[in-house]
Image (cartoon, rainbow, N blue to C red):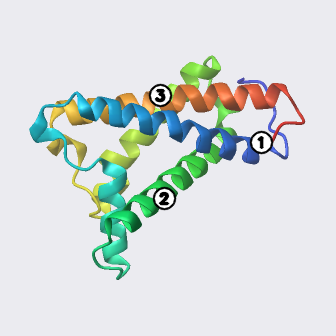
Amino acid sequence: MANVSPTSTDWVKGAAAGFAATAPMTVAMEVMQGRLPWWQRGPLPPTRITERVAHRLGFGRLSRTTRRIATTVSHFSYGAAIGMLYAMLARWLPFPATLGGVIYALGVWASSYLGWLPALKILGPATRRPLQRNLLMIGAHVVWGAVAAKLFQAMREKPDAA
């Protein structure tokens, strides 16, 4: 992937790959959450992020249905946006596609959970979370990165796919 020049539709393919990869990531999060000790099974970060951003925007407390819809929309939208960025950076990653996607996704996890989320006071830093919760989110990001990279690679190999 490192020597492939981007095409004009790569950003669309990256967004589609990122959006689609968010589904298995979400399933992985929910499965891994069920294996946590009961006292660590609180709301997953996408829900907590959505609740806090909605509160800051003046929406107050969201109903269960609204929270679920808003979380799903925001999580998949973020997956698409990060997938779009991956598509623009993939050609510079000196690794096979899947490994590059995983490394990219680990960077997304670190920059989010150790960077901008704490900086904006949306979530505390991951260093304040139990190891199992961090491993859950790291594992979910690995799933996202591997799937997004493979989907993007497949779409790039079929030029008419977008």
Crowd band around label 1 with a 10 angstrom C-alpha radius: few (<14), some (14–19), many (20+):
many
Picture residue at 37% right of the left edge, 28% below the top: 139
Q: Residue at x 39, y 45 (%)?
A: 111
- C-alpha separation, residue under disc 1 versus residue under disc 2: 22 Å
Query: Whole-Å distance between the Cαs marked 3 and 1?
Result: 21 Å
Residue 123 in percent (x, y) is at: 26, 56
Determine the image quadrant of residue 98: top right
Q: Amino acid at mark 1?
A: Asp
Which quarter shows the C terminus? top right
- Disc 1 target residue: 10
Q: Earlier in the sequence, mark 3 or mark 1?
A: 1
Q: Amino acid at mark 2?
A: Ser
In which quarter of the view is residue 108 placed?
top left
Q: Which residue in the structure is indicated by mark 2?
A: 74
Position of residue 80 in the picture relative to residue 74 (left or right):
right
* Cα gap from disc 2 to disc 3, whole angstroms: 18 Å
User: What is the x, y in percent for residue 61?
Assistant: 27, 74
Q: Nearer the viewer, mark 1 or mark 2?
A: 2
Residue nearer the viewer, 47 or 159: 47
